[in-house]
Amino acid sequence: MGDPREHRGGDTHTVTKRRSEVGAAVGGLRLAPARRPAMDRKPVVEIENLRKTYGSLVAVDGISFAVQEGEIFGMVGPNGAGKTTTIECIEGLREQDGGSVRVLGSDPHRDGYALRPRIGVQLQESLLQDRIRVWEALHLFAGFYPNSMDWDLLLEGLGLAESRNVAFAKLSGGQKQRLFVALALVNDPELVFLDELTTGLDPHARRAIWDLVIEIRKQGKTVFLTTHFMEEAERLCDRVAIIDQGRIVALDSPENLIRRFGAESRVVFTAEDGFEAQRLNGLTAVTRVERIGERVVVHGEGDELIVQVVNALSEGGVPIRGLRTEQSNLEDVFLALTGRAMRE
Amino acid sequence: MRGLSRLTLVEMKLFLREPMMAFFTLAFPLVMLLCFGTVYGNEPSDYFGGYGMVDVSVPGYAAIVIGMTGFLSLAMGITVYRERGVLRRLRMTPLRPYAVLLSQVAVLFLMTALGIGLLVVVAKLLYGMRFDGDVIGVLAAFTLSCLSFFSMGFVLAGVAPTARTAQIVGMALFYPMIFLSGATMPLEAMSDAMRQYVKVLPLTHVVTLLRGMWVGDAWGQHLTEVAVLGVLLVVGLVVSAKTFRWE
């Protein structure tokens, strides 16, 4: 797994831009439908004070949130934070010890069988039979639902058409996950649950899966996902609940979380020895300037930072090279909120 | 209903694709028949009350197939599916839990019947096996034996923490039965005392019941076997209902 810092450097605008580029690539040139304002949309998942304990271990410690129709909602946090327990209570696979869970207006535990045709589920660490073929799995699962999609189209859309006769055990990790996505979509659900969908995948396969998730949302479905990859949450989610030790420590859009809790941003460039870096300290957006050999790192806050630094440099006529910005990301937000790094 | 039938069909295909399962259920009994049939033939003998070696062996081999599917195939199948999360994934579909279990029972019942069917056909064609019982009686005895052993298989699947444990415990319970239940070594070859001891093995009752039905005994002569298998069936169902785990 690569160092998360490799991925730094995308500010919030780049994230949104990348998102629409990906969407256009997947869905032809069709643009994402205009999203309705949040107030018009109704909650599809409502959690009130959810609690779940295993013996003396408190896995989920009284969390509340709502997922709105048509959004990609993510729960992020380290392994063991309570993400899977929460998603499994919502799916109806586990019964909570306290609090209430409503999914599409029903109680997932009591009305589970009425709800199942309307939801699609990909479970963490679930496998299929080794010798079942891709098409057999889809044919089988399609038969469980009163209404199901044309799964041949689904296979094509997910890039599995050529593997339709391949046995499950012979699929690559990415293909297996795409098959599980196909199985989660075969009943054309309104709400799709994806639990640690890209864990164990290589970066290339992970990106391919991200495109799929965005495509699922474009079809008007709501996506509820969990991940322990902050970058994944940042790229995909409209809103993110950061969960740690069974509690939600923050819930907002990734952009807002980074703005509110993210540490400063940085402008980094290389300048010749004669450059007096300290004079950048006078700029209002700058908090600190560091000089490491030829490299200059300007720390500061807000969107003004880069504008002020670039203006000052061009006015001074200083020759500089390789200017780039580094934005804080959700990893920094997690660190700021919990005092611990995501990966210990 | 469509879900159950598709699952049963897929499970049947998967069973036949699994070389171990298919071999032990379908081919292994035939191999035993051919080995012992070649060595001993099927001449009528006073030792077996006028029947030949093959005549008395076929119900015994049939009992082995039943024991194998119950103690090994079923318990292994369920525990492996539990470990891999297949059961969890199926539970998230509208398919009812009983349908998942029913499809397993249906597939193993059909495969056991197929294995025994092959055995009977080959024994008939190659060795002119004698059969004096009535078909309904044999089918009833076969069904009772299967269900009884399947319910014990469910207990094993529920109690065993892992698939590996289920396999080891299943083998440890089943292997002695191959030799001591009369399924391979006829009960006639055992001392009277031995014949009493081996009655603690459930498979002994299957062998005795099937052999009885094979030669046309009345049910009244086999009340003990029917009672033992019936009690095991009920106890197995009650215990497995309490111990069964989906994950």
Image (spheres, rainbow, N blue to C red):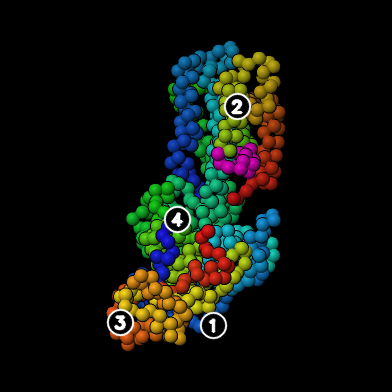
Under mark 1, the amino acid is: Asp
**How many numbered circles does the render carry?**
4
Under mark 4, the amino acid is: Gly
Circles 2 and 3 on the same chain: no
Considering the whole magenta stretch, tell me its main secondary structure: helix
Please, which chain is the residue tagged with disc 1 on?
A
Mark 4 lies on residue: A200
Q: For residue A318, which numbered disc appears in the image?
A: 3
A215 horizontally vs A84: left or right: left
Under mark 3, the amino acid is: Val
The secondary structure type at the circle numbered 1 is loop
Mark 1 lies on residue: A40
Q: What span is colored magenta in the figure? A: B152-164
Q: How much space separates mark 2 and mark 4, taking CA atoms? A: 45 Å
Q: Are marks 4 and 1 in contact (CB under 8 Å)?
A: no
**Nearer-N-terminus badge (4/1):** 1
Mark 2 lies on residue: B177
Q: How much space separates mark 4 and mark 3, taking CA atoms? A: 46 Å
Magenta stretch containing residue A183, yes or no?
no
Which residue extends farthest front? A274
Q: For residue A110, which numbered disc appears in the image?
A: none
